[in-house]
């Protein structure tokens, strides 16, 4: 079977670094508890042992309005396998915060917006978007309810000397309570969509409105904020964590290798403008591209932001699948956040 190329979004790991208390440069990631093992035999000509391990980052301390955007090269995360070659089989992650008795509980998107977290390795090449986003795994606000699980017997191969880094992008909005402006919904939109405003960093200019430069990119000294009310100065900083469970196996001879690719539309762009038009409120962006190999699609996962409706995939004009955004109905309930 030829390697499969899938628009896949997961998140994981590689080495460990210590965070400078005065910066958003690097963070420690540690395994939580002992790894668990499960034998996979049903329907398998070559059975294998699946290992499941949970990881937690150290705390990201964030004040109201604050933006976190880590440097991939300086945010190494532990690669599953502990220095041995392995195959990644699946993963589930989310953003958590401090809970009762030292526990961690899910952090509502209305409190801290999980724009994305992505994992990169220098040797990885995205064959679908050459010159576009070049990450292996990653996902954003939909991660809590979107486990990434490869079909049984398939996995993403990891070399024994692999080193991965994470770009983690969070924005603390607190349902607009502390954000500047009379309309909290508009304030949240402007913060999460990276609108230009003074105080968002030296790189944020009106010309770069809507880009990561206005969302904390390269602002590793914790100085970049969405505009806030004076009341925000009285609010305490909260701790947030990236936590994830990853499944893998050392029995790589039993696993069919999968290639991972990411495609962004339109035309592999990281950003594109959607101008408000009340007469035609829906905007469609589409791109046609050629898959550069004979491949079987094993898994496809869509990544959208607030305002997105759906992502659809067609092959030679034949509909294959769609990923529809789901908007919650309850205030501050993780997994069902209103709006």
Image: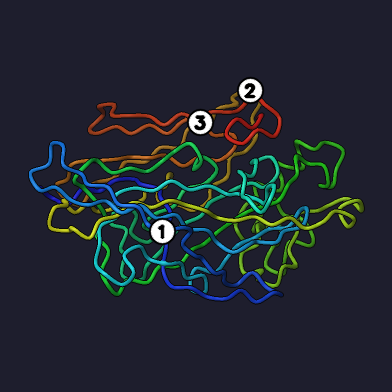
**CB atoms at circles 1 and 2 under 8 Å apart?**
no
> In this figure, which residue is indicated by the disc labeled 2?
279
Q: Earlier in the sequence, mark 3 or mark 1?
A: 1
Task: Name the foreground residue: 82 vs 335.
Answer: 82
**CB atoms at circles 3 and 1 under 8 Å apart?**
no
Rounded to the nearest angstrom, the CA distance separating label 1 from label 2 is 57 Å
Task: Name the foreground residue: 85 vs 53.
Answer: 53
Q: Is residue 258 left or right of residue 263?
A: left
- Looking at the image, is mark 3 or mark 2 nearer the viewer? 3
Estimate the x, y position of residue 132 in percent, counting from the top left: 40, 58
Q: Earlier in the sequence, mark 3 or mark 2?
A: 2
Q: Secondary structure at mark 2?
A: loop
Rounded to the nearest angstrom, the CA distance separating label 3 from label 2 is 22 Å
Disc 2 crowd rating (10 Å Cα; few below 14, some 14-19, many 20+) is: few
Place residue 211 in its image quadrant.
bottom right
Q: Secondary structure at mark 1?
A: strand
- Above or below, 148 relative to 32: above
> In this figure, which residue is indicated by the disc labeled 1?
34
Chosen colour scheme: rainbow
> In this figure, which residue is indicated by the disc labeled 3?
325
Residue 17 seen: yes
Residue drawn at x 61%, y 27% as measured from the top left: 328
Q: Secondary structure at mark 3?
A: loop
**CB atoms at circles 3 and 2 under 8 Å apart?**
no
Residue drawn at x 44%, y 38% as measured from the top left: 146
Rounded to the nearest angstrom, the CA distance separating label 3 from label 1 is 35 Å
């Amino acid at each position: 079977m030829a390697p499969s190329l899938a628009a896949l979004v997961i998140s994981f790991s590689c080495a460990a670094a210590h965070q400078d208390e005065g910066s958003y440069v690097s963070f420690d990631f540690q395994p939580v508890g002992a790894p668990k093992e499960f034998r996979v035999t049903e329907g398998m000509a070559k059975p294998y042992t699946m290992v499941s391990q949970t990881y937690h980052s150290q705390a990201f301390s964030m004040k109201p309005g604050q933006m976190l955007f880590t440097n991939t090269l300086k945010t190494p995360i532990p690669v599953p396998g502990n220095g041995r070659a392995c195959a990644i089989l699946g993963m589930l992650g989310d953003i958590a915060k401090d809970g009762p008795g030292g526990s961690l509980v899910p952090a509502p998107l209305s409190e801290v917006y999980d724009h994305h977290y992505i994992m990169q390795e220098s040797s990885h090449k995205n064959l679908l978007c050459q010159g576009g986003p070049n990450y292996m795994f990653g996902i954003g606000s939909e991660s809590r309810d979107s486990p990434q699980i490869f079909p049984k017997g398939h996995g993403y191969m990891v070399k024994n000397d692999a080193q991965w880094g994470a770009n983690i992008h969070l924005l603390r909005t607190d349902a607009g309570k502390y954000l500047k402006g009379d309309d909290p919904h508009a304030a949240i939109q402007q913060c999460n969509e990276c609108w230009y405003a003074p105080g968002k960093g030296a790189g944020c200019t009106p010309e770069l409105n809507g880009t990561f430069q206005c969302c904390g990119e390269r602002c590793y000294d914790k100085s970049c904020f969405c505009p806030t009310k004076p009341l925000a100065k009285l609010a305490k900083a909260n701790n947030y964590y990236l936590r994830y469970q990853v499944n893998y196996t050392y029995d790589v001879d039993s696993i069919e290798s999968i290639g991972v690719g990411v495609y962004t539309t339109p035309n592999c762009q990281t950003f594109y403008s959607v101008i408000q038009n009340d007469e035609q409120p829906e905007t469609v962006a589409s791109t046609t591209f050629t898959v550069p190999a004979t491949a079987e699609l094993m898994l496809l996962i869509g990544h959208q932001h607030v305002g997105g409706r759906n992502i659809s995939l067609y092959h030679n004009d034949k509909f294959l699948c769609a990923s529809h955004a789901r908007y919650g109905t309850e205030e501050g309930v993780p997994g069902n956040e209103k709006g």
